[in-house]
Amino acid sequence: MKLQEYQSKQIFSKYGIPIPKGRVAATANEAKHIAEELGGRVVIKSQVLVGGRGKAGGILLAKNPQQAEQVAAQILAMEIKGLPVRKVLVDQAADIETEIYLGITNDRAARKPVMMASAAGGVDIEQVASETPEKIVKVHIDPLLGLRDYQARDLAAGIDLPRDQWRTFEQIARGLWQAYKGNDASLAEINPLVITSDHHLVALDGKMVLDDNALFRHPDLAEMRDLDIEAEAEVEARRHDLSFIKLDGQIGCMVNGAGLAMATMDIIKHFGGEPANFLDIGGGASSEKVAAALRIILSDSNVKAVLFNIFGGITRCDEVARGIVTALGEVKTQVPMVVRLVGTNAEEGRQILANANMITAKTLADAAQKAVAASRGGSSL
Amino acid sequence: MSILIDKNTRLLVQGITGNEGLFHTQQMVAYGTNVVAGVRPGKGGEWVLEGKIPVFDSAKIAIEATGANTGVIFVPARFASDAIFEEADAGLPLIVCITEGIPVQDMMRVRNYLDQKGVRLVGPNCPGLLTPGEAKVGIIPGDIAIPGNVGVVSRSGTLTYEVLYALKEFGMGATTCVGIGGDPINGTNFIDVLGMFEADPYTEKIVLIGEIGGTDEEKAAEFIADQMTKPVVAFIAGQTAPPGKRMGHAGAIVEGGSGLAADKIRAFEAVGVRVASHPEKIPNLLR
C-alpha cells in the first residue's frame, strides 16, 4: 500500500527527520489559510500516487497567500495520469543548495534491507541506477542487528557529503531505518533530501510503501488507504478476499491459485486471445466467494467469454460449481462460459453444472482454445 | 528414492488443532506419512485423530517425546515467523511452512537467523513436499502424482498440481516434488533444490516451474549451466502479466524492468533448458 507524500513525511517527522513546515488542504481556501500561517513563499504540491507530478504541472510555487489560493484551485481541478487531485500539500518553500537521495528498500536477492544514497538526488533515481550506477552508494543492513552508525557514515562519506553535515545525516538515516522497520515498509524514500542555503538538511519529498501483509500490526496506517487509485472492481474484490486485477482483454478468467491463474492468462494469449483479468479465488473458496467473483468478472462489459479453470485440492470443485450456479441465478448474461474442473470432487462439480448450459473442457489447452473461439462468437456447445 | 522427505520422516505439525492443520494432518496420515506429534500451546496432553497423535505445548517438548525430525507449519501469518523460530531453536533440521501472507520483514529476520543456524526452511506460502508413494508434508493432493524419476521444483501451488497431473497422464512420475513458495523471501531457492536433485541418483530429469518477479530463475539458469548434468525442462508463468501489479503471490511482480517472464525464458534457453509454451507441453519435452 502506497502512502501519499504528506502521510509519509508525517511519519518521517515522528522519527526525528526534519521536514518543511506545512499542512495538507482539500480546498483552495484552506490552502490560502495555511499559506498565511506559514508566511513567505510556499510550494503547493498535488497529492496523488503517481510519479512525474512536477512535470505534469502538479507542483507550483506561490509568492503570497492570494497566489497560493489561486494555484491550489488550479491544481485541485487537475487530473494527473488519470487520477483526480483531491488534496494539496502546502509547504514552506526552501532555498535549495544541494539535492541528495536517501532510501531504504527490501533487496530480495540479498534477503536483507538495503539503504541507498546518491549525490544525484531530485531526479528519477531508477534512471540514475540504470545509467550511472556508480553514483549510488549502498549498504546492506542485517535485519537482526539494524542499521549500524558506521554504515550511515559510510553512506555520507560515499556521496561526498560535507563533514559538518555527517552527524545530522546519521540521525536522518537512523530515523529512516526506524520508520521503515517500525511501520513494516517495503520502501521508505527521501527524494530529495536537500541541503538548504543556510546549511540545514531537510526531507523535501517523501514516499513510503507499506507491506499489505503487515497491516494487521498497523491498523492506523491501514485506514490511510486511498481507494481512489484502485479500479472499483478491485476494491470490491478485496472486500471478498479475492485477488483480482483488471486487464484489457475479452476473456474473463476465474482460477484457483496465483501461478495457475497466470498460466491460464498466458495460455489464452498463446491461442490468440486476451485475458480480461487476473483472478485468484484462493484455496478452499466457498460458493459465495465464487459467486462474487463471477459478478465482478461480468461487470466488465468488455468480457465476451469466461473461462473457469479449477484444479481442486483444498478447493472443492462441487463448491465452485454451486457458486457458479448461484451467480448465474442472479446475473442474467449471454456471455458464453467454458469450464474445466479437475481434482477434488470434479465429477460432482460437473454434474451440478450439467444443466447450466456451459462449454466443458478436459485439458487446459482445450479450455483456452474453446474460450478464445467463444469470445469471437464461434462457439458450439 | 527422493530428496528431503521419505519413509523415515517423523513429522511434527505446528497448528495441528486448527481447521487447516487438522484437515491436512488427516490427509498426510492417510497418505502414509509418519506424523508423530502436534503442537498447540495450551492444548498439551490432548490427542487428535481418534487418539492417534499426541499434542504438545511446545516444539521442544514434542521433539523430546517423539523424536520428530521434520516440522510443518499451518499457523496463521501473524504467528508463523515465531513458529519457525521455535522449531529451529528446538533443533529441527527441516521446517516446511505452508502459511501464506507472512510480512516480508519477518521473513528477512527468519531467513538471516536460519542461515546462521544451518536450518533448512521450505516455503513459506508453499504447498510443501511430496515424495510419491512414501510421504507428503503439506497440502499437495496425493493422488495426482505417481512415483517416478522426475524431480519437480516450483514457486507455485496449483500450477504444480497441474504439472504433476499432466506427468501422470503421460505415465510419468516424480521422485520428489518441492514447492518452494511464491514469496519474495523464502527459505529454499531453486538452486538449493536443483543441487539436491543433481545429487539424488534416482532423479533423472527435472521440471522447474517459475514465475515472474525476482531473479531466482536467472540464477537457476546459471547454476544449471555450471553445475548440472541432468536435463531440465522449465515453465514460466506470467508472460502476460502487466508491470507494477502484484499477481497474487507477494513475489510475483515485475518491478523496474526486472523479473520479466521473457528475460527468464531467454536465460533458460541460452543454457539449453527447454521452456514449455504451456504446462501440458512439459511431458513431451521430457521424453
Image (cartoon, coloured by chain):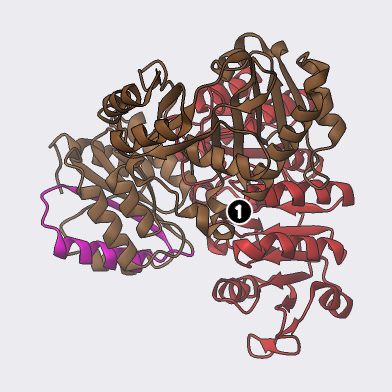
Give whichever of A206, A181 is nearer the camera. Answer: A206
Q: Which residues are magenta?
A: A314-343
**Left or right: where B256 falls relative to B2:** left
Figure chain in brown = A
Task: Give the colour of chain B.
Answer: red
SS label for mark 1: loop
Q: Splitting the image into 4 quarters, where does residue B86 fall?
A: bottom right
Q: Amino acid at mark 1?
A: Cys
Within the magenta stretch, is there residue B82?
no
> So how many labels did they put on this image?
1
Residue carrying label 1: B126
Q: For mark 1, name the chain.
A: B
Percent coordinates x, y for residue A191 in the rendering:
58, 24
The structure residue drawn at horizontal position 55% and vertical position 53%, both measured from the top left corner, is A213
Indicate yes or no whether the magenta region holds residue A338: yes
- Image vertical order of residue B212 relative to residue B162, above or below: above
Taking A237 as reference, is A273 above or below it?
above
- x and y percentages locating residue A262 in the rendered image: 43, 40
Mark 1 neighbour density, 10 Å: few (under 14) some (14–19) many (20 or more): many
Say above or below: B44 vs A338.
below
* Residue A98 position (above or below residue B33): above
**Residue A253 image position (x, y, % from top left):** 31, 45
Is residue A277 in sight in this rendering?
yes
Q: Position of residue A202 (x, y in %)?
A: 63, 27
Is A364 left or right of B64, judged from the image as shown?
left
- Please tell me in which quadrant of the rendered image residue B22 appears: bottom right
**Is B1 or B178 nearer to us in this picture?**
B178
**What residue is at 21 percent from the left and 65 percent from the top?**
A325
Work out whether residue B287 can be spotted.
no
